């Protein structure tokens, strides 16, 4: 219907233009009598045509879903983990659209979500770890480092709220562009008691179950989606779903039902919609989704991994149900679908089996600067634009979603607070255009924090990916890891000592960027001084505090 309306509107506007031109040429007196009316009609029809071009957008964000947690292979080959999971709707989406094999997010959730909403890197917005309570840091204590006063209160529309990033969020810009903005699921944008904790305050017209917490109290309606069953704090209880309390319904399903009702209302109101379907799945605490759980037990998985696999399949069913509702409304040709995870899959704790192996062939998982912590599944479907079953191997990162979605929505001329956006639109890639300028683009990660668990790549660090090279700088001992991720996807061969020129080049680029955005660094407990940026003095110009920090790095690095 939208496609038909668009064609009719454009055709009508062209006829009006033709009539106007003909009238002017044949009867000059007509100008003075009918020009105002014709201009009004032409303008109205052109505006209708422009509005009709605003495609609906579904952004499907999954929590803690690893690169391998799907039957869709994002590696060059199908792996045993791909054979474990059942995600037929992801398979169908990938078959219709474009699969991104080198998509990245931050290593933990809040930084990713704030980057998505603002287009800013974590180094710039300073929400570098996960948020919850107002003015309280969630950093675990570290033996040698004190952590900076990062923006523990998250994203805020109010510049007067302390320790927040003040920015205009993506949904506010889309709403200004005429969209009905729908939030469903996990928010985790701002700390308890701050404006950013309520999705309404950052631009969502509808909020289904979103608040300050980064995980569910429970996935079970029989437990009222509350943490009471595990003697947990009520801050984890999922709000606004009271009508499902006491019922045998899984949280993923309840969220999907409510999201589809919100879509129905937007369609009834003749509004293009932006659905941010941000599932709590597949975050802990796991629970057995009885619709899918038993077959994974029968396949030999232990209780924890069977619950996890069922969570993944339940998430995939949600994707299928939402797309089926879009199709029921006749909007499949006018709805863009984007799918991504907020960080790598959980592996350091909380899973069954051996730690740090749940994302193989990638190393490590959530919380890690290694690929297992930051490389995520991503699929994009733009009807009539993406080639069916296509694959894009060019790297993209989470802040790229901000300018991309605005471009896809036809929302132009917007400016972020401060006038800076780190993200870069991937819309040209959806057309199948290979962007050579992206090949040397630097992707930056910055985590001057302590998540808690230990494992490969986990700990306070900064990292850069440029071309095939990836450099990780560890804040505690100023050491480096250098990997060629093209030939060493599992990051097993540290080349930092063997290739000092490559190490130093990347260190200088990383250090220069961190200095330019005035990134925060931890303090060394032993010296009382800030941990220096990586790189050399020549990497920074005009920033005396950053320059002093960089001068502390030894000429060859460590």
Image (cartoon, rainbow, N blue to C red):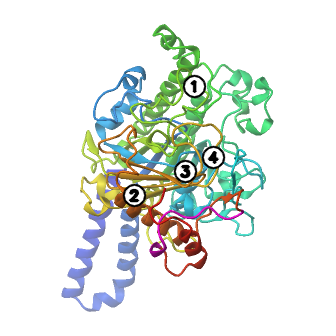
- From this view, report whether residue 506 is shown above or below residue 23: above
Residues at badges 1 and 3 in contact (C-beta under 8 Å)? Answer: no
Find the magenta span and give its range: 528-539
Bin the neighbour count of mark 1 within 10 Å (Cα to Cα): few under 14, some 14-19, many 20 and up: some
User: What secondary structure is found at the residue carrying circle 2?
Assistant: helix
Q: Nearer the viewer, mark 1 or mark 2?
A: 2
First in sequence: mark 2 vs mark 3: 3
User: What secondary structure is found at the residue carrying circle 1?
Assistant: loop
Looking at the picture, how far across and down is residue 451, in whole percent? 64, 44
- State left or right for residue 551 relative to residue 73: right
Q: Nearer the viewer, mark 2 or mark 3?
A: 2
Q: Which mark is residue 112?
A: 3
Looking at the picture, how far across and down is residue 370, in whole percent? 47, 43
Measured in 3D between alpha carbons, the distance from the residue under mark 1 to the one under mark 2, in whole angstroms, is 34 Å
- From this view, report whether residue 149 is shown above or below residue 286: below
Q: Nearer the viewer, mark 1 or mark 4?
A: 1
Q: Which mark is residue 503?
A: 2
Measured in 3D between alpha carbons, the distance from the residue under mark 4 to the one under mark 3, in whole angstroms, is 11 Å
Residues at badges 2 and 4 in contact (C-beta under 8 Å)? Answer: no
* Magenta-colored stretch includes residue 43: no
Q: Is residue 517 visible?
A: no
- Choose top left, top right, bottom left or bottom right for residue 117: bottom right
User: What secondary structure is found at the residue carrying circle 4?
Assistant: loop
Q: Nearer the viewer, mark 2 or mark 4?
A: 2
Looking at the picture, how far across and down is residue 232, in whole percent? 78, 31
Measured in 3D between alpha carbons, the distance from the residue under mark 1 to the one under mark 4, in whole angstroms, is 24 Å
Label 1 belongs to which residue?
Answer: 351
Measured in 3D between alpha carbons, the distance from the residue under mark 2 to the one under mark 4, in whole angstroms, is 38 Å
Measured in 3D between alpha carbons, the distance from the residue under mark 2 to the one under mark 3, in whole angstroms, is 26 Å
């Amino acid at each position: 219907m939208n496609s038909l309306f668009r064609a009719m509107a454009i055709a009508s506007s062209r006829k009006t233009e033709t009539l106007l031109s003909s009238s002017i040429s044949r009867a000059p007196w007509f100008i003075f009598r009918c020009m105002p009316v014709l201009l009004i009609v032409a303008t109205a029809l052109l505006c209708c045509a422009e509005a009709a071009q605003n495609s609906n957008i579904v952004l499907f964000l999954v929590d803690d879903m690893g690169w391998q947690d799907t039957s869709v292979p994002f590696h060059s080959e199908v792996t045993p983990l791909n054979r474990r999971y059942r995600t037929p709707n992801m398979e169908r989406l990938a078959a219709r659209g474009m699969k991104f094999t080198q998509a990245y997010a931050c290593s933990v959730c809040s930084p990713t979500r704030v980057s998505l909403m603002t287009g800013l890197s974590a180094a710039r917005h300073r929400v570098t770890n996960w948020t919850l309570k107002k003015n309280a840091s969630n950093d675990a204590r570290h033996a040698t480092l004190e952590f900076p006063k990062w923006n523990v209160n998250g994203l805020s529309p109010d510049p007067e709220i302390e320790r927040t990033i003040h920015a205009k969020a993506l949904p506010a810009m889309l709403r200004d562009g005429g969209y009905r903005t729908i939030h469903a699921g996990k928010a985790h944008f701002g700390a308890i008691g701050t404006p950013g904790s309520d999705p309404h305050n950052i631009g969502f017209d509808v909020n289904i179950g979103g608040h300050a917490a980064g995980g569910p109290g429970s996935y079970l309606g029989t437990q009222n989606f509350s943490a009471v069953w595990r003697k947990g704090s009520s801050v984890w209880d999922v709000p606004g779903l009271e009508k499902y309390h006491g019922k045998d319904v899984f949280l993923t399903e309840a969220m999907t039902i409510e999201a589809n009702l919100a879509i129905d209302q937007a369609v009834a109101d003749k509004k293009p919609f932006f659905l941010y379907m941000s599932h709590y799945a597949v975050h802990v605490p796991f629970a057995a989704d009885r619709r899918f759980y038993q077959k994974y037990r029968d396949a030999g998985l232990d209780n924890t991994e069977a619950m996890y696999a069922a969570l993944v399949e339940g998430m995939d069913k949600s994707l299928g149900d939402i797309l089926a509702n879009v199709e029921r409304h006749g909007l499949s040709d006018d709805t863009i679908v984007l799918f991504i995870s907020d960080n790598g899959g959980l592996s350091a704790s909380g899973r069954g089996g051996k730690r740090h192996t749940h994302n193989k062939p990638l190393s490590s998982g959530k919380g890690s600067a290694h690929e297992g912590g930051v490389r995520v599944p991503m699929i994009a479907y733009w009807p009539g634009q993406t080639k069916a079953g296509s694959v894009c191997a060019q790297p993209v990162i989470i802040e790229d979603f901000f300018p991309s979605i605005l471009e896809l929505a036809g929302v132009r001329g917007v400016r972020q607070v401060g006038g800076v956006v780190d993200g870069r639109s991937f819309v040209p890639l959806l057309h199948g255009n290979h962007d050579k300028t992206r090949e040397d683009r630097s992707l930056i990660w910055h985590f001057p924090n302590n998540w808690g668990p230990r494992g490969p790549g986990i700990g306070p660090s900064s990292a850069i990916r440029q071309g095939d090279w990836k450099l990780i700088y560890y804040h505690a001992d100023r050491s480096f890891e250098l990997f060629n991720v093209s030939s060493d996807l599992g990051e097993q061969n540290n080349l930092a000592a063997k290739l000092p020129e490559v190490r130093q080049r990347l260190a200088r680029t990383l250090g220069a960027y961190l200095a330019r955005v005035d990134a925060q660094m931890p303090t060394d407990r032993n010296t009382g001084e800030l941990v220096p940026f990586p790189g050399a003095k020549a990497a920074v110009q005009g920033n005396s505090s950053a320059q002093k920090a960089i001068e502390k790095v030894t000429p060859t690095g460590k």
